[in-house]
Image (cartoon, rainbow, N blue to C red):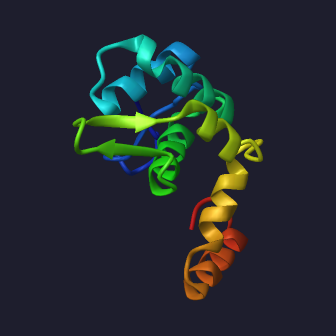
Amino acid sequence: LTETGDDSPYVTQIKLGNLREKEVNQVIMALLSIDDDSRTKGLASICHKRTIGSPIFLLEFIKVLEKESLLFFHLGLFRWKWNNSNIEANTSSTKTFVYLLQVKMKKLPLETQGLLLCAACLGSSF
């Protein structure tokens, strides 16, 4: 953590690098409360491939998997369930996470899409 160096001492920058597949697996295990790393290894491999290990993209990708019911909590078994082949097949067109974000943004209300378009014209900080 480092301070930005300007007049805003309460703003902190965190530099995140891409996670390796092992670290992606650890994140998934923590999120799903699973202790057995071999159980999540296949899911971690897919998630790493789709997000290139970006921590932010990883979390968003997992949210998408849950929203699309590719990852779900089974109340009868009281555990998270998924099918690696199903996830692989349903996300195979997701070459990069940018595609996933585009799909998500197209589902937003038109007013919100317009606001994002205006914000994009202003640059990365506005």
Q: Give the image location of residue 69, x and y in percent.
A: 47, 52
Horizontal arrangement in the rendering, residue 88 relative to residue 71 (left or right): right
Total numbered badges shown on the rendered structure: 0
Task: Give the residue displayed 42% in from the left and 18% down from the top.
Answer: 39
Horizontal arrangement in the rendering, residue 98 relative to residue 35 (left or right): right
Q: Quadrant of residue 80?
A: top left
Above or below, comparing residue 44 to residue 99 in the picture? above
Horizontal arrangement in the rendering, residue 85 relative to residue 37 (left or right): right
Horizontal arrangement in the rendering, residue 30 relative to residue 103 (left or right): left
Question: In front: 106, or 121?
Answer: 106
Extreme bottom residue here?
Answer: 111
Q: Give the image location of residue 110, x and y in percent.
A: 61, 86
Above or below, comparing residue 11 to residue 116 in the picture? above
Above or below, comparing residue 123 to residue 75 in the picture? below
Extreme front residue here?
Answer: 76
Q: Give the image location of residue 4, x and y in percent.
A: 46, 40
In which quadrant will I find the N terminus? top left
Q: Is residue 41 visible?
A: yes
Task: Give the residue displayed 66% in from the left and 54% down from the top.
Answer: 100
In which quadrant will I find the C terminus? bottom right
Q: Quadrant of residue 19?
A: top right
Question: In front: 67, or 10?
Answer: 67
Q: Is residue 91 visible?
A: no
Task: Give the residue displayed 41% in from the left and 19% down from the top.
Answer: 26
Q: Give the image location of residue 98, x and y in percent.
A: 71, 51
Q: Quadrant of residue 36?
A: top left
